[in-house]
Image (cartoon, helix red, strand yellow):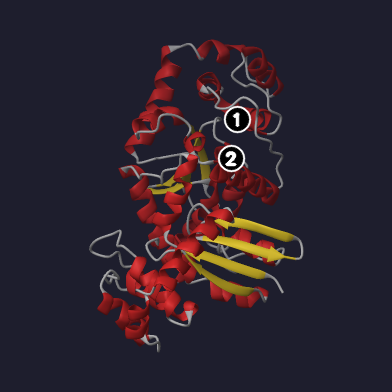
Amino acid sequence: MATLEFYYDFVCPYAYLASTQVEALARRTGAQLVYRPLLLGGLFRHLAGEGYAPNQMNAARAKVGERDLERYAALYGVPLVRPAEHPRRTVLALRATLASGDVARASHALFKAYWGEGADVEQPQVVAGALSAAGLDGAGAVARSEQAEVKEALRAATAEAAEAGVFGVPSFRVETQNGSEVHWGQDRLHQVATALEPGLSWPPDFPRGRGEDAARELEIELWYDFSSPYAYLGWCQLERIERETGARVRPRPFLLGAVLQQLGYAGAPVLSFPPAKQRYVGTDLERAARALGVRYQFPSLFPLRAVTPLRLALASGEHLRPLSSALFEAYWADGQDISNEAVLREIAGRVGVPEAAFEATQSEAIKQALKANTDEALARGLCGAPSFTVGSELFWGQDRVDLLIDTVNRTAGA
């Protein structure tokens, strides 16, 4: 029997969303579900020796994250109530969970209290009440949470999670006859599902299909920079988005580095990650590329200065799409230095870009066009690439394409 281990802390809203799905996923695949509560702050402290500090959310990213949570809560059909004060300390709730005698039932009760009702789980009476409402001995669990062995159990669980390669929550460790693998984020449940049962999507029947009356004038903007591997994977789904929604995708090249700098990042965020997270990102990219059936290898030249390629894309007119496809593939599949003029000219020549486009990359008009796109990206709240905008709605990440398609098709059918 396959095993699905679920690592979480009640403080994380994404872990809450995952908690609403893991039991159904385990039942669907016949996997044994194991609950692994941990103290997220303790996990961060454990990883501090690797130079790790948890991501600090800037305002733009926080806003995108809030909308993301709302969309997934609506997709799963579950309540989402942010507590009056967040984050709350969850050490009492976690210890009481371990002391409850039924970790699964206690976990669902306390996730519901924190994120379904917005309750203050720092308060012993709140924790006891939530556990009692779930049919457990709430008062007894709270009392036992002060025992030395319970405190040690939580410390040990947190340390064991770090040793297993967990660096954030929610995380999932899948054990099958093919070995074990770790997935991070509730937005990777589809990968967890596939690992447990090849071909299974999650949620089932997601995204919803395009209705018969879906022919409409709708524009989806795809914001990208050649320097991002996730933008490459997002670009590879451009035709699928158009096919499954009936919308027209408008490519919008912009300077990702300039946006990140304005948001307070000193460079490519991945370079600041601890070794465990960097390894995971590499694995995550490979998994995503395999799922899409596209070639991918991380280039030796990284980060890439993509100013000239982006200007050329803007100057290429009707050749923008084939040129962008060729440049993405050259860099992220073949490892070519597309910032090199000779390489750039060879690729552009293959797709029919005229010489005049190269001359235009030095023109004030094209420079200003790229700056205008970048300024607009900032003004519209972008915090990374790829991003997709549909009117005032913003979706960030190649892993939000299914959610984008589902939202567009659901809105069209409303």
Write down the quadrant of residue 402 in the picture: bottom right
- Give me the residue at 59% from left, 19% from top: 339
Rendered residue at 53%/62% (across/down): 213
Give x and y (percent) for residue 282.
62, 42
Q: Residue 1, image x and y in percent?
A: 72, 74
Count up the numbered dots.
2
Q: Name the residue beneath numbered marker 1.
A: 324
Classify residue 304 as left or right of residue 17: right
Decide if residue 222 is in sight here: no
Q: Residues within 10 Å of mark 1 (few under 14, many from 20)?
A: many
Q: Amino acid at mark 1?
A: Ser
Q: Earlier in the sequence, mark 2 or mark 1?
A: 2
Q: Position of residue 289 (x, y in %)?
A: 66, 45
252, above or below 58, in the image: above
- Please identify the quadrant where the C terminus is shown: bottom left
Q: According to the image, label 2 marks what residue? A: 235
Residues at circles 2 and 1 in contact by the CB criterion of under 8 Å: yes
Report x, y in % for residue 346.
69, 17
Tag 2 secondary structure: helix
- Residue at x-position 29% and y-position 62%: 88
Q: Amino acid at mark 2?
A: Trp
